[in-house]
Image (cartoon, helix red, strand yellow):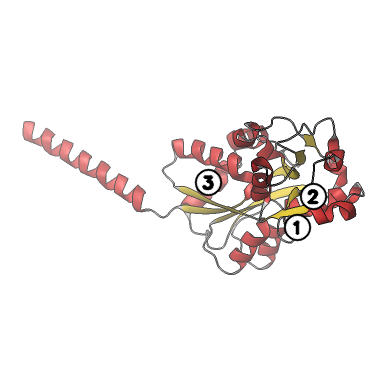
């Protein structure tokens, strides 16, 4: 009887070791994510990992560049874009394996480490000493495209265009402003609310939504992720109230409908 108990303990221990080994060798779910999601998505993955053995690895960049990579068969399982247009284009190319999920509405802010932009609004860019203004590259970053639209709306783009410093994505644009490489910038609200940026400046000016096209953000499983149970589990978690609360904390409003 005693030897049977020892044998049972051995088998249970061996099974646990085997399960751990399987979890460690299982390929991670790769999420191609717009860089405005950096802090929000990192938080979502942390909470998801507390109750799931699925490993999720985010790769951040500009939505346009990530779209190009997925179009060229990059092995991402999920695409979280800052502009729902890109997931729709993948859908048209038959490169998706799920319905598009609208996870949030992004917002733009005027932010500066050197001054309080809240009372100045868009005129912060006209203050003495503001020589370099950071935005994301409008050629492939939705936040850069909307920044140009906002500056055009306020009839400031032509006078400021020579002073614009373009980040590869919105995260790099925010980095330019937070390090002092640019005097001010138009960045994502989600990044202005992050602990990293708050360390330098807690105040910002929220650019009115009527000044630009909406930043309707969408997520979709790619064709590569079609048979990934882990990807399906994480996609489902993105739709939970827990994930929505985290996105809301970082300034992403929930789309209507």
Q: Position of residue 217 (x, y in %)?
A: 70, 49
Camera-near label (2 vs 3) is: 2
Crowd tier of the residue under label 3, counting other residues whose Cα lies within 10 Å: few below 14, some 14–19, many 20 or above: many
Residue 197 numbered tag: none
Distance, label 2 to label 3, CA atoms, is: 31 Å
Q: Quadrant of the C terminus?
A: top right
Residue 145 at x, y percent in the picture: 78, 55
Q: Can residue 193 be seen from the camera position used here? A: yes
- Residue most extreme to the right: 155
At mark 3, the secondary structure is helix
Label placed on residue 234: 3
Q: Earlier in the sequence, mark 2 or mark 1?
A: 1
Q: Residue at x 59, y 40 (%)?
A: 39
Q: CA distance from mark 1 to mark 3?
A: 30 Å
- Residue at 51% across, 63% down: 75
Furthest-front residue in this view: 129
**Residue 184 coordinates in the image, percent (x, y):** 75, 42
Is the C-beta separation of discs 2 and 3 under 8 Å? Answer: no
Q: Which residue is mark 1?
A: 138
Q: Taking 163 as reference, is 197 left or right?
A: left
Q: Residues within 10 Å of mark 2 (few under 14, many from 20)?
A: many
Secondary structure of the residue carrying tag 1 is loop
Q: Nearer the viewer, residue 91 or 119?
A: 119
Mark 2 → mark 1, Cα distance in angstroms? 8 Å
Which residue is nearer to you in this view: 233 or 146? 146
Lower position in the chain sequence, tag 1 or tag 3: 1
Asked whether residue 101 appears in the rendered view, the answer is no
From the viewer's perspective, is residue 115 above or below residue 146?
above
Residue identifier under label 2: 147
């Amino acid at each position: 009887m005693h030897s049977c108990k020892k044998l049972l303990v051995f088998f249970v221990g061996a099974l646990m070791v085997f399960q751990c080994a399987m979890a460690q060798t299982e390929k991670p779910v790769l999420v191609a994510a717009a860089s405005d999601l950096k802090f929000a998505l990192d938080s979502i993955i942390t909470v998801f990992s507390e109750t799931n053995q699925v490993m999720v690895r985010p790769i951040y960049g500009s939505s346009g560049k990530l779209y190009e990579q997925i179009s060229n068969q990059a092995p991402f399982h999920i695409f979280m874009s800052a502009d729902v247009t890109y997931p729709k284009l993948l859908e048209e190319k038959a490169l998706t394996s799920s319905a598009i999920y609208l996870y949030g509405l992004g917002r733009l802010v005027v932010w500066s480490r050197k001054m309080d932009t809240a009372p100045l609004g868009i005129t912060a860019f006209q203050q003495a000493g503001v020589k370099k203004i950071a935005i994301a590259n409008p050629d492939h970053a939705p936040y850069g495209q909307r920044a140009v639209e906002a500056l055009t709306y306020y009839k400031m783009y032509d006078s400021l265009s020579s002073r614009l410093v373009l980040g590869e994505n919105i995260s790099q644009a925010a980095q330019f402003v937070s390090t002092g490489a640019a005097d001010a910038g138009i960045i994502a609200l989600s990044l202005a609310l992050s602990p990293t940026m708050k360390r330098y400046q807690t105040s910002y000016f929220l650019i009115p939504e009527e000044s630009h096209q909406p930043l309707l953000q969408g997520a979709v499983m790619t064709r590569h992720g079609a048979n990934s149970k882990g990807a399906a589990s994480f996609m489902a978690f993105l739709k939970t109230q827990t994930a929505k609360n985290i996105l809301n904390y970082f300034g992403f409003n929930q789309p209507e409908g």
